[in-house]
Amino acid sequence: MLSDKHSFASKAAKVEAQGITPPGYVPPQDEKPITIGGTDWWHILGLEPYGCPLRLWFEKRGVEPDVPQEVTKPMQRGLWLEDVAAKYFSKVTRIKVRRRKVKRRKGMPEWLGGHIDRHIVATESTDGPGILEIKTMGEWAYRRFQREGMTLGYVAQLQHYMLLTGWRWGMLAILEPSRWELYVGYAKADPELQKQMLSQAEMFVEQVEKGLRPTRVTNNPDHSACKACPYRRRCWGELLDAERSENGMEAEEDNSPQLVKAIEEYIAARDAKQEADALLEEAKRNLQELLGKREVVKTPVGIVEWRWSAPPKRFDVKAFKADHPELFEKYVREFEESRSRRLKVIL
Ligand code: SF4
């Protein structure tokens, strides 16, 4: 039974009142010493699709983003569902976990920080205590994760907490709530990787402290990292304005939060559609591969058809124009006004 302190309702009230501050999300005050948390590795290592050292540098230097950053619904979902995911993890793995605050072990640099999601309780059959990192993902992100697996960003995050605590292993639990699926991954401490991470982070911390700007992760402002970056305007400046309107139309300035939100929602929906289209294509290819040369197949869940279609018939405009130039001119029309409006967001 959850105590009231950890209940969803009390968490929800806290989130509404104070907002969520995941590591690296809120720029630290200038006087605060820099801290590198587990999620910062995506940026320090410049990992696809959104990692960029310069973006993190802006954050750690306390630079104002282009537009105020809101606590997103996926962030709230992640916080509220953390307990659920931890319980689910324990149920399927029979591994006992606890909440626990950990201290940075001796000998680690002062900038190494962060909080573990759960402490995996040591048993006789484990190599001491372990880290449990918990994530919640929407359906599309989860499917992408299933395709890509435990990429370096997740591995680096677990290695970070192992460095912090000195523990020798960790697990990743990812909950996809709508299909009620749970991914569980495992990683062992990798001293060589940890050494490389520390030296990379040392360089980055020095850049932040001395104000030395790291290079951009890309030379293309349309890179996926830049499109999702809250410092895009600051980073690319007038170059964006020059490319903003491809037909040279004068852009009317409108900084209303509603319009910004509507644009963000449009982009999120467009990205979700692109992901869904890619998944559909993949599922289709898989199905076609299984069908091979067969045109109609009956299965317990239904009939699947993949028939050859008749060759398409098309009106040959070029040939018609060549054979009947007068008729063509008589019936061809040019409209004075454009009949449709094309919606395009140029970021
Ligand atoms: S706009 Fe792109 S290159 Fe610039 S900080 Fe953001 S992610 Fe990095």
Image (spheres, rainbow, N blue to C red):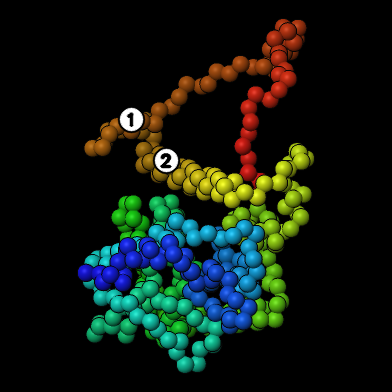
In the image, 123: left or right of 238? left
Identify the residue under disc 2. 284
In the image, 318: left or right of 115? right
Does 93 sit above or below residue 71?
below
- State the image quarter where residue 138 is shown: bottom left
Assign the N terminus to one quadrant of the image: bottom left
Label whose residue precedes the other's in the sequence (1 or 2): 2
Visible residue check, residue 293: yes
Residue 321 spot, x, y in % from top left: 72, 13
In the image, 340: left or right of 110? right
Does 30 sit above or below residue 26?
below
In the image, 99: left or right of 142? left
Mark 1, Cα crowd under 10 Å, few <14 / some 14-19 / many 20+, is few
Residue 250 spot, x, y in % from top left: 76, 41
- State the image quarter where residue 92 is shown: bottom left
Q: Which of 128 and 230 is in front in this view?
A: 230
Q: Which residue is drawn at 72% across and 43% down?
A: 252
Q: Which residue is drawn at 29% across and 32% down?
A: 303
Question: Which residue of the protein is positioned furthest toward the bottom in this rendering?
Answer: 106
Looking at numbered disc 2 in the image, what kind of residue is underneath it? Answer: Lys
SS class of the residue under badge 1? strand
Residue 315 spot, x, y in % from top left: 61, 16
Q: Residue at x 64, y 74 (%)?
A: 61
Q: Nearer the viewer, residue 283 or 51?
A: 51
SS class of the residue under badge 2? helix
Looking at numbered disc 1 in the image, what kind of residue is underneath it? Answer: Val
Cα–Cα span, label 1 and label 2: 15 Å
Visible residue check, residue 271: no
Identify the residue under disc 1. 296
